[in-house]
Amino acid sequence: MTRQVDVAILGAGSAGLYALGQVRKATDSWVLIDGGELGTTCARVGCMPSKVAIQVGEDMHRRNIFDREGIEGGEQLILNQEDAMEHVQDLRDVFVDKVLSTSTDEMSEEEFIEGNARFVEPGVLEVNGERIEAKKVVIATGSTPLVPSAWESFRDRILTTDEFFEQEALPESVAVIGLGVIGLELGQALHRFGVDVTGIDMAGTIGGLEDPVARDVAIEIIGREFPLWLGEKAEVSEAGEGKLKVTAGDNEVEVDRLLVSMGRVPNVRELGLDALGVELNDNGVPVFDPHTMQVGDLPVFIAGDVTGDRPILHEAGDEGRIAGFNAVQETPVAFARKTPLSITFCDPNIVTVGQGWSELDEAAIAVGEVKMGLLGRAIIMGRNRGVLRVYADKRDGRILGATFVAALAEHLGHLLSWAIAQELTVFDLLKLPFYHPTMEEGLQAALYDLKGRFDVEFDHPVELRPLK
Ligand SMILES: Cc1cc2nc3c(=O)[nH]c(=O)nc-3n(C[C@H](O)[C@H](O)[C@H](O)COP(=O)(O)OP(=O)(O)OC[C@H]3O[C@@H](n4cnc5c(N)ncnc54)[C@H](O)[C@@H]3O)c2cc1C
Ligand SMILES: NC(=O)c1ccc[n+]([C@@H]2O[C@H](COP(=O)([O-])OP(=O)(O)OC[C@H]3O[C@@H](n4cnc5c(N)ncnc54)[C@H](O)[C@@H]3O)[C@@H](O)[C@H]2O)c1
């Protein structure tokens, strides 16, 4: 049996659903195919449940300053891990139900096929023994947590984010292997839930921080909460009584479980991508244009985490929109991509915006910096550890990027990414309002420091714009 459609979308995750939103505007002839767990990685095992766990951990952690604020009894507070995990799961279910009720739940059997598709030819797919001829195909199959094959014999004691949010009870001790985004967010949350956490990364940094000043500040602050072993690869072996021995360089610990957060691999293995006859990169992902999301010059588009390019939700959304839009055009349209913005929701937040430290030529930039120690609002909140670093073009003060390690820096990151997208300079930004007392005043202080690196004189206060 062969079915013919204008567009077939592989993957009912965020990127696939955004693609479908565009396709539906142009044609009724489409099919969505997904053989995995529905509800999207973001709602099911990603952005949303992780933020619930972080929130619970932050609320509990706050008790550490109650004494200073004159609030008594903080030391008697107990975090009931099972109830806390149930709360994570309850909210996770709310988010998943919301996705399902507005997507696959509403679709007919003609529209949604439960199964994993593979290519037979560029425009021909096979799923559950059925052949589908599609004028255009969108690949949006996402990614899966990486677990080294050498650790297969301990798999029953390894948690990845695919299992973590299903846990009813938490282990007493955990080694978090990989202190990128997931390792930092969940490692810190686990520590604040009362689990004995050891964090390990083979890189000499955490959260992927490249800026050396921000890196040292982040390691110092987060390292006060739980041990961070950096710069050595983790090795794992049996320790007896069900425990695992984890070593990294000279360090050694015995733990009940590993939380493995060593990155994710694109879901391409089962897709039969060789049938496309195009170049595949080292991860088996076809080479594509990031502005059209087209694969070579084929009637095939790709979007979301499967690309391995910008594995965050708003980029998966944009890629889905671009792929879906172009799947129903005669000729693909190239779209500009957004200013890079990355937020790790650990405490303090780690945020990078625009060009990263390693992309910049140190000789061609000016750097403005402020430490959070003296910032009024941060002192009031008891969260005044951190640093803000802003990079500008030395020639004209145009903002190029920034790295922030600070409480609530998620918001400062947005402000600065919007400023970069508008090609604003440090002098433009200083003319904008900064309310008192806010965390934004920290950004203002970093901008003043940055301005001081320029040898420019104004005949009026830099904060003011003369009426023409
Ligand atoms: C723990 C965690 C926390 C995160 N937190 C954040 C955050 O705070 N902010 C943020 O911006 N991003 C965050 N992310 C990243 C974000 O969740 C992803 O970028 C986003 O969900 C990717 O969407 P996607 O559609 O590409 O993939 P998915 O939502 O995974 O969708 C892929 C779909 O393809 C299906 N599929 C796989 N193979 C096939 C096949 N052969 N045929 C058909 N279907 C197939 C799968 O079943 C799945 O439904 C987080 C991720 C994780 C893991
Ligand atoms: N807040 C967010 O936006 C958010 C939150 C969670 C996840 N995500 C997305 O999920 C993706 C995957 O996250 P992740 O944290 O798994 O990957 P990651 O790439 O951010 O971090 C992986 C870390 O593992 C380390 N590592 C790899 N092999 C190791 C080894 N053998 N021993 C010790 N350390 C090792 C790496 O040095 C790296 O620091 C991210 O790229 C991110 O885009 C985003």
Image (cartoon, helix red, strand yellow):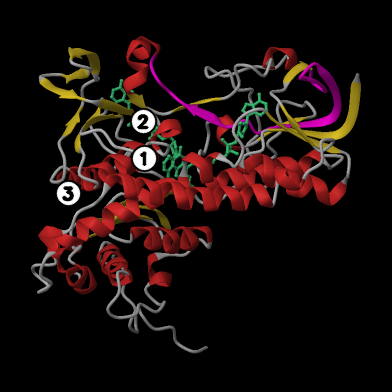
Q: From what the image shows, is residue 113 above or below residue 281? A: below
Whether ligand 2 has any atom under 8 Å from the Cβ at mark 1 is answered as yes
Residue 364 visible in the snapshot: no
Q: Give yes or no for residue 132 being in the magenta stretch.
A: yes
Q: Residue at x 9, y 74 (%)?
A: 70
Q: Residue at x 88, y 44 (%)?
A: 28
Residue 234 visible in the snapshot: yes
- Which numbered marker is on residue 181? 1
- Position in image of residue 445 (x %, y %): 26, 69
- Position in image of residue 430 (x %, y %): 37, 73
Q: Secondary structure at mark 3?
A: helix
Whether ligand 2 has any atom under 8 Å from the Cβ at mark 2 is answered as yes
Residue numbers of the magenta segment: 121-148
Q: Amino acid at mark 1?
A: Val
Q: CA distance from mark 2 to mark 3?
A: 21 Å
Check disc 2 and report the residue beneath it: 261
- Mark 2 near mark 1, Cβ–Cβ under 8 Å? yes
Q: Looking at the image, is mark 2 or mark 3 earlier in the sequence?
A: 3
Which secondary structure class fits the magenta region best?
strand
Q: Quadrant of the N terminus?
A: top right
